[in-house]
Image: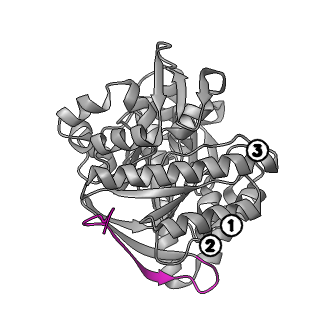
Amino acid sequence: MPGETHRFRFSITARDPNSSARVGRLETAHGVVETPVFMPVGTAATVKALPTVMLEAMDAQLLLANTYHLLLRPGPETIRSLGGLHRFMGWPRALLTDSGGFQVFSLDTLRTITEEGVTFRSHLDGSKQFLSPERAIEIQVALGADLIMAFDECLAYPASHERARQSMELTLRWAQRSQTAFWRAEVENQALFGIVQGSTYADLRRECSRRLVEMDFPGYAIGGLAVGEPPALSYEMTEVTVSELGEEKPRYLMGVGYPLDLIEYVRRGVDMMDCVLPTRNARNACLFTWSGKLHIRNAAYVRDPRPVDERCACPVCRRYSRAYLRHLFNAGEMLAATLATQHNLYFYLDIMRCIRRAIRAGTLDKLAAELKQTEEIEAG
């Protein structure tokens, strides 16, 4: 069968009785990923401030790297010559690469879209670059990630229905071309996901989902959300989309979100998520805890001997005080970003562990209520 991938399987092992949440098992050439899963973002073949050994220690199962950034430097052929992205970045577990579409389309004034693809200027040096569905697949095959994405067009919010339909149709044509290019590459240990677009229009989301399902991808991503629309609308579009994607394939919602978002999307049937929020906030001295957000630069913590989160079992909370982390940030020490990132990612991964346990136990609603109480609270 064209496009058949070896060592890629997805199975459901538990379901929540009160929602569409499920626990799954995603088998890849670089290990098993238990879903629902949160993927730390390693844009340029690194999760900023953390070595991969720390990510392994906190049991991150799947990392995301970015096609656009790796195309610009060091280049996919360089990475291929060094044994592929896993070996290049020293990561033995599963990897996912996006298609580069979101980054390219976010360039706005630096790009030109045609049926063939997108011509754009590098944000690094202004050099002229081109991405098409075929080129995006060629790059991702060279990188060697376990899960790769079809090339798509990501619209800004808001967009008119007419513009959203035009974009959806282009995305579907590009999905077919991406799939054909992937089949021609004859790779064995990668799986290609299609991406659902349609802005915030339920009819377009349903239509795009149905037409992608007809193409029979091994998994499906939900793109074009978390781009400025209200959370309630994002939840609604996710639910609408998932309802058309079937039960047997994994569903990946791109670019979300806050801790409460994770559980809300899981309740709507999402299996995979990624977001720069825990790492970016960490570098800006904002830490997530089970008691709410903690802005560690605040003067209130200058003599605070407590850990960042007394409920957290991460190495940072076991060893260091709030006063110490505040000192590191105020002194401009590089270690501040490392420790804060380590804590925030551990916290996100711990939430996912709690979500999986709650689905199995039928207590997901209780966990959601607990997270909702802490979402907008400043930790004491």
Q: Is residue 215 shown in magenta?
A: no
50 or 17: which is nearer to us?
A: 17
Looking at the image, is mark 3 or mark 1 earlier in the sequence? 3
* Residue type of the residue flagged with mark 3: Arg
Q: Residues within 10 Å of mark 2 (few under 14, many from 20)?
A: some
| Residue 206, numbered label | 1
Q: Disc 3 versus disc 1: distance between alpha carbons? A: 16 Å
Q: Position of residue 162 (x, y in %)?
A: 79, 48
Q: Quadrant of residue 295?
A: top right
**Residue shown at the point (75%, 63%) measured from the top left:** 202
Contact, mark 2 vs mark 1 (Cβ under 8 Å): yes
* Residue type of the residue flagged with mark 1: Arg
Q: Disc 2 versus disc 3: distance between alpha carbons? A: 22 Å
28 or 41: which is nearer to us?
A: 28
Q: Is residue 311 visible?
A: yes
125 or 339: which is nearer to us?
A: 125
Q: Main secondary structure of the magenta part?
A: loop
Residue span colored magenta = 1-20
Q: Position of residue 254 (x, y in %)?
A: 55, 52
| 303 left or right, relative to 27 | right
Which of the two marks, 2 or 3, is nearer to us in this view? 3
Which residue in the structure is indicated by mark 2? 244
Q: Residues within 10 Å of mark 3 (few under 14, many from 20)?
A: few
Q: Is residue 13 shown in magenta?
A: yes
Tell me the element at label 2: loop
Tell me the element at label 3: helix
Looking at the image, is mark 2 or mark 3 earlier in the sequence? 3
Q: Quadrant of the N terminus?
A: bottom left
Looking at the image, residue 73 lies above or below residue 361? above
| 42 left or right, relative to 208 | left
Instruction: Pick out the residue farthest to the front.
Output: 115
Which residue in the structure is indicated by mark 3? 163
